[in-house]
Image (cartoon, helix red, strand yellow):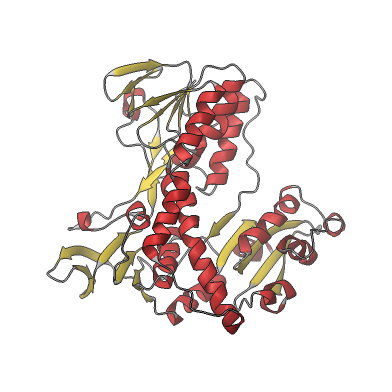
Amino acid sequence: MLYIGAGHGTFDGAAPLAETGVSVGAIESSLIGGTCPNRGCNAKIALDEAVKMTREAERLGDVLQGEIAIDWNKNVAHKQEIIDPLPAGLTKRLEDAGAKIIKGHASFKDEHTVLVDGKTEVTADKIVISTGLKPHRLDIPGTELAHDSEDFMNLKQLPKHLTIIGSGYIGMEFATMASEAGADVTVMLHSDKVLRDFYQPYVEKVVADLKQRGVKFIKNSDVKSFEKTDEGYQVNYGASKLSTDWILDATGRIPNVDKLGLENVGVKYDASGVLVNDHLQTNVENIYAVGDVISSDQPKVTPAAYFGSKYLMKLFSGQTSEPIKFPVIPKVVFTSPRIAQAGVSVEEAEKKGLEISENDLANYWYYIVDKEPIAASKQIHDKDGHLVGVTEISDQAEDAVNALLPAIEFKFDREQVSRLVGLFPTIGYAAWHRA
């Protein structure tokens, strides 16, 4: 069994697969662990912790004494201390399980053979494509002057003025961080909507809060080019110009399939990823794909990659022959406040005529503790009273939604939910109490 890539789509399943006695190899051209541990989720949340603390200190006011501010350079150093050990730890996990790690870039020679760095042949009965996503780059003049998310998270000194192109996860999370750390931030939208995958009334609350903090938003910006100037850089958009010190291209992420040689074996893929069936199998019988690189109706987030990796482990070790059945995959954007959701969205519920209940959490005891001014949630029940969806905006939204996942996944009715009483006083108790 050979995996191309060593992120969550690989190591979560490859290690336990190797422990069953299956011969497992993983080819990785960069750091073991892939994007999430090294230049994505783990790094991002480490940087955000300081933002979270300064926001809470701001809300508590004179309850705390002394000024609290972010030292960006030390924040980046703290992030690095956290993520530096991860590749070695994941390498040990794989190798201790019996998997072999091969460093280099993989490309298909034929359906059973992969070339590493164009020269060393590695053969396998089955091959799994697990290469994830990579940053999208605007195809405009001067695109090389812009930076990606990894560059931002490694900035030793925060620019005075930062321009972010894009208003998805990366754009909004980094706008929150940079603004709180003292940068003058401008976010340029391709359209007129921010965070299109989230409940827009809650998104508008996040945007309004950022605007109050000085973040500028330019809708339908029609970015045409970037230029280097004597003072810094210039963004040319529509018929206007914007001077800035640093440009972040946060226009999304795309399937990382370049130079894999998929055309050599006829594996089908499109702009959304590698095409797979309900067993994560491509159109080539012995080649599979998993994680963010696949074309799927699941969110392209770590939990989906984790579950897919575990599924393939069971499939390849003979523990199942059934099609994959994804559980409820939650998603969250780590702005301040956060927005998290799982299951049926509010928009879907409105179309289907499902029951939608709303809670004003800013006046709920647990959220009053840290004086959250923006906190609300919507729960969605089907006609039989099962909890089928939840969306929350608050600084604790991710924990509240996590607490409710079992009810959504296993379709608990109101009587079953009433028998689940969380630890008190915690956000889990609060979430169950109002479900």
Depicted 392 relative to depicted 318: above or below:
below
Q: Is residue 409 left or right of residue 246?
A: right
Depicted 54 relative to depicted 142: above or below:
below
Where residue 144 sits: x, y (%)?
21, 54
Where residue 410 sits: x, y (%)?
76, 47
Depicted 182 relative to depicted 145: above or below:
below
Residue found 18% across the figure and 58% down from its top? 142
Q: Quadrant of the C terminus?
A: bottom right
Q: Is residue 32 left or right of residue 65?
A: left
Q: Nearer the viewer, residue 159 or 415?
A: 159
Q: Nearer the viewer, residue 334 or 97?
A: 97
Q: Quadrant of residue 422?
A: bottom right
Q: In the current view of this chain or complex, which residue is farthest to the bottom? A: 62
Residue found 41% across the figure and 17% down from its top? 112
Q: Nearer the viewer, residue 292 or 243?
A: 243
Where residue 70 sits: x, y (%)?
43, 69
Depicted 369 relative to depicted 282: above or below:
below
Where residue 278 sits: x, y (%)?
57, 33
Can you see residue 276?
A: no
Residue found 45% across the figure and 33% down from its top? 6
Q: In the current view of this chain or complex, which residue is farthest to the front? A: 66
Residue found 60% across the figure and 27% down from its top? 16
